[in-house]
Image (cartoon, rainbow, N blue to C red):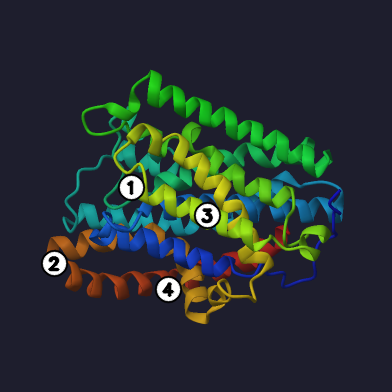
Amino acid sequence: MSQENAAPSKGFHIPSLDGIRGISVMIVFFAHAGLEKIIPGGFGVTIFFFLSGYLITTLLRLEFAKNGKISLPNFYMRRALRIFPPLYLTVIVSVILGLAGLLHDRWNWEGVFGNFAFLTNYMGNWDWVGSPGTGPMWSLAVEEHFYLIFPAVFAFGLAKMLPKNRGIALLAFCALTLGWRLVQAYYLGYANVPQGFDPRMYVATDSRLDNIVFGCILALWGNPMIDEDAKARPMPWVWIGVGFAGLIAMLVLFRGDNAFRHSWRYTIQGLCLIPVFSGAIGRHKEIPFRWLNAKWLRWVGLMSYTIYLVHLIGFDLVEEHITKSFMPKLLITMPLVLLYAWLMYRLVEKPMASLRKRYN
């Protein structure tokens, strides 16, 4: 049985996670730059989901081990201070650009409300359209829907279970989510509509929650950061290799099979990320994971949240007013997005991080 450890000392840091954030946001950024045929932007989002589930659940475990309970009000306050300010400010910037005529994508005020209310991933059902460049906020909606419920599930259920039983319970949930995707893909026909597939299979909370839950499984069962047996015996290289091979196979094979891609593939990716993440964290000083702690990559990881929020706005501005050519567009947009992200980090995220400490 894995040992439940007390909370670590101040300055607790999980190796490699900033680097993984940096890789994930670069995958999304370059895919949206025009390389979507060779760079799988959706996979970058899947990694973000897994990482979020792992990190948040690890912190919940540490809080429960130290205090014997979870303060749900404190959790939600920390979450709000982390997520809301950069998102709301970026939506406001997008609205101002739209009203000023600098961005011409169709949008409506109902969609802006949907952005603020974390309904971006369901707005297509109601003809609500968010402000220009805010489409990527669908993934934040998925996460926030999950975190409205999961901390209570953990505090009153999972935290009191044996690690193996936690893993089994969450794997059962992942199996149910896969079953629902299979119904959508093969019975309801959402994978074979005229435009290729119904986007609800890609963005809907009920279709994508398992990508977060797979990260929760690693946090609760064999966590390489806080479980003594997992730290003493890091993930074997053979399983790390199997994880990498599975991820590559999912990106290369079945590219034209929409039903498989939007049902089985998400589950297989989630399973494969478990050994890969375990290796990246438990073997962070070893090749091939050591480079994830490079300073430049960690810096990109620190900026990744705002980069993700604003990058499409940046691309849209440059395309409408300067150039649509790939390389000039990239060379102009990248520094603009990084500057915006750095300013947001310095002026908003860091002060909010200091305020969040009151609710630790």
In front of the other: 200 or 249: 249
Q: Please, what secondary structure does the residue beneath circle 2 have?
A: loop
Residue carrying label 1: 135
Badge 2: residue crowd in 10 Å (few <14, some 14–19, many ≥20): few
Please state if 337 lies on the left or on the right of 219 as rendered.
left
Instruction: Determine which of the numbered discs, if any, sits on residue 325 in the image.
Output: 2
Residue, x 37% and y 73% (percent of image)? 338
**For discs 2 and 3, the disc positioned in front in the rendered view:** 2
Cα–Cα span, label 2 and label 4: 27 Å
Locate residue 359, reporting x and y percent.
71, 57
Q: Which mark is residue 83?
A: 3
Disc 1 marks which amino acid? Gly
Q: Secondary structure at mark 3?
A: helix
Spatial distance from mark 4 to mark 1, Cα to Cα? 22 Å
> Between residues 56 and 22, which one lies in front from this camera angle?
22
Q: Which labelled disc corresponds to residue 343?
A: 4
Q: Is residue 191 above or below residue 27?
A: above
Q: Position of residue 125 (x, y in %)?
A: 33, 28
